[in-house]
């Protein structure tokens, strides 16, 4: 076992659990742990090195993480043929899981100008499989209340706490109107299985049955465009609009040919853009909260990219004009305004 210079009680308990039963039963002999990844939640992953290879052990405190949901959703995705980790052992009382290792190459690491078409096509094919082959009606509903709660993170954690703003009555009215507009657009859409974090840091490059999918425990029944918006308007990597539009066309064609609804292209583009805006408001709020509450400042580096997305969308949709003014007034005081100047300014009236 690997020893730490600093006491890590949860890690010690995890090692003891592995040593006492599940790992020893699968692979007798010594093993070692090394950090594999830590996401934006309280969940941590360790790579278990043993004589026959590697596995992944998850430390997911049961008072903070919904491990039963992770297991239920994993089984549904596996039944649909989606490449997700196989579960070998579990201790739900302690919040420990032992599962297969999907490697350490994320889409974010592998994406480039040459690989992007192939990798995104495979990710969209898998998304279509998830949406058409995975029952979701029994999952929690992506309700208007939840959509609004997520957007309010932007107001609370980014504007009020991170930027330390006192919002005017007009600012508050603009936010109410904006949140309502984005919420109503989301609620108009056909509903399917929604992963909720289908982006380049949670999608793994695999030698077979690519890609591998992680962090699906918060899945809900919700808008058709949500996961595609997470994928193609990713908070961690961005692409020219022309290329993104080509990928959207590919997705629409694949969904329809797989038995999904026939989507009108311009209508879906609007849903996609506005759904991404809802998600980006949530993401910026979460990034600010991770910095202020959880002492994870690195996520602040991703805020300018996400603000660029928002600026571009606000320029293109007339009902977001007032919100664009709010962004200019507040965000540009903290960030270089030239960063947020979109290449295309033609507004779309809807």
Image (spheres, grey):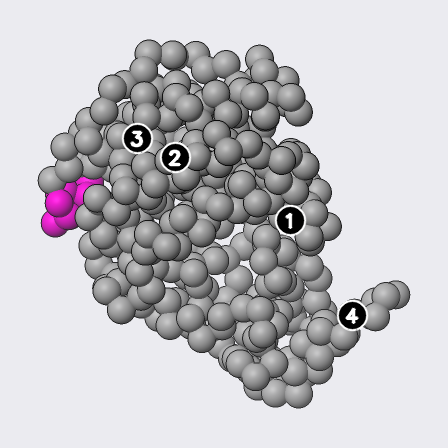
Give the labeled residue for mark 4: 8
| Residue 229 in sight | no
What span is in magenta?
254-261
Give the labeled residue for mark 2: 178
Q: In the image, is residue 202 above or below residue 159?
A: below
- Earlier sequence position, callout 1 versus callout 4: 4
Q: Residue at x 27, y 39 (%)?
A: 185
Give the labeled residue for mark 1: 290
Assess whether residue 2 is covered by the magenta stretch.
no
- Earlier sequence position, callout 4 versus callout 3: 4
At mark 2, the secondary structure is helix
Give the labeled residue for mark 3: 247
Q: Where is residue 58? Give x, y as percent.
A: 59, 68
The span from disc 1 to disc 2 (Cα, nearest Å) is: 24 Å
Label 1 Cα neighbours within 10 Å, binned few <14 / some 14-19 / many ≥20: some
The span from disc 2 to disc 4 (Cα, nearest Å) is: 44 Å
The span from disc 4 to disc 3 (Cα, nearest Å) is: 44 Å
Q: In the image, is residue 100 above or below residue 181?
A: below
At mark 1, the secondary structure is helix
Q: In the image, is residue 328 above or below residue 94?
A: above
Figure quadrant of residue 54:
bottom right
- Earlier sequence position, callout 1 versus callout 2: 2
Q: Where is residue 255? Give x, y as percent.
A: 19, 43
Label 2 Cα neighbours within 10 Å, binned few <14 / some 14-19 / many ≥20: some
- Earlier sequence position, callout 2 versus callout 3: 2
Label 3 Cα neighbours within 10 Å, binned few <14 / some 14-19 / many ≥20: some
Q: Quadrant of the C terminus?
A: top left
Q: Nearer the viewer, residue 210 or 216?
A: 216
Figure quadrant of residue 60:
bottom right
């Amino acid at each position: 076992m690997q020893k730490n210079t600093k006491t890590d009680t949860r890690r010690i308990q995890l090692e003891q659990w592995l040593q006492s039963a599940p790992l020893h039963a699968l692979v007798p002999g010594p093993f070692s742990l090394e950090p594999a990844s830590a996401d934006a939640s309280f969940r941590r992953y360790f790579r278990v090195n043993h004589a026959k290879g590697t596995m992944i052990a998850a430390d997911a405190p049961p008072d903070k993480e919904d491990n039963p949901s992770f297991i239920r959703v994993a089984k549904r995705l596996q039944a649909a043929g989606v490449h997700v980790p196989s579960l070998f052992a579990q201790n739900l009382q302690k919040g420990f899981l032992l599962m297969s290792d999907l490697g350490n190459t994320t889409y974010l690491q592998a994406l480039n100008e040459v690989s992007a078409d192939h990798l995104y096509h495979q990710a969209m094919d898998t998304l279509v499989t998830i949406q058409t082959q995975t029952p979701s009606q029994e999952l929690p509903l992506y309700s208007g209340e939840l959509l609004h709660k997520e957007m309010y993170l932007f107001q609370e954690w980014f504007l009020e706490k991170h930027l330390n703003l006192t919002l005017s009555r007009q600012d508050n009215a603009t936010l109410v109107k904006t949140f309502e507009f984005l919420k109503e657009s989301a609620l108009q859409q056909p509903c399917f299985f929604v992963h909720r974090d289908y982006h380049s840091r949670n999608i793994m490059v695999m030698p077979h049955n690519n890609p591998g999918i992680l962090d699906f425990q918060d899945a809900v029944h919700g808008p058709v465009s949500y996961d595609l918006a997470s994928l193609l308007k990713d908070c961690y990597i961005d692409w020219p609009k022309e290329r993104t539009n080509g990928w959207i066309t590919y997705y629409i064609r694949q969904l329809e040919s797989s038995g999904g609804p026939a989507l009108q292209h311009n209508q879906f583009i609007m849903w996609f853009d506005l759904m991404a805006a809802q998600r980006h408001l949530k993401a910026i709020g979460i990034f600010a909260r991770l910095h202020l509450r959880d002492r994870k400042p690195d996520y602040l580096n991703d805020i300018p990219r996400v603000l660029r997305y928002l600026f571009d969308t606000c320029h293109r949709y007339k009902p977001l004009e007032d919100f664009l003014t709010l962004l200019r007034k507040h965000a540009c005081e903290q960030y270089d305004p030239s960063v947020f100047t979109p290449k295309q300014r033609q507004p779309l009236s809807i």
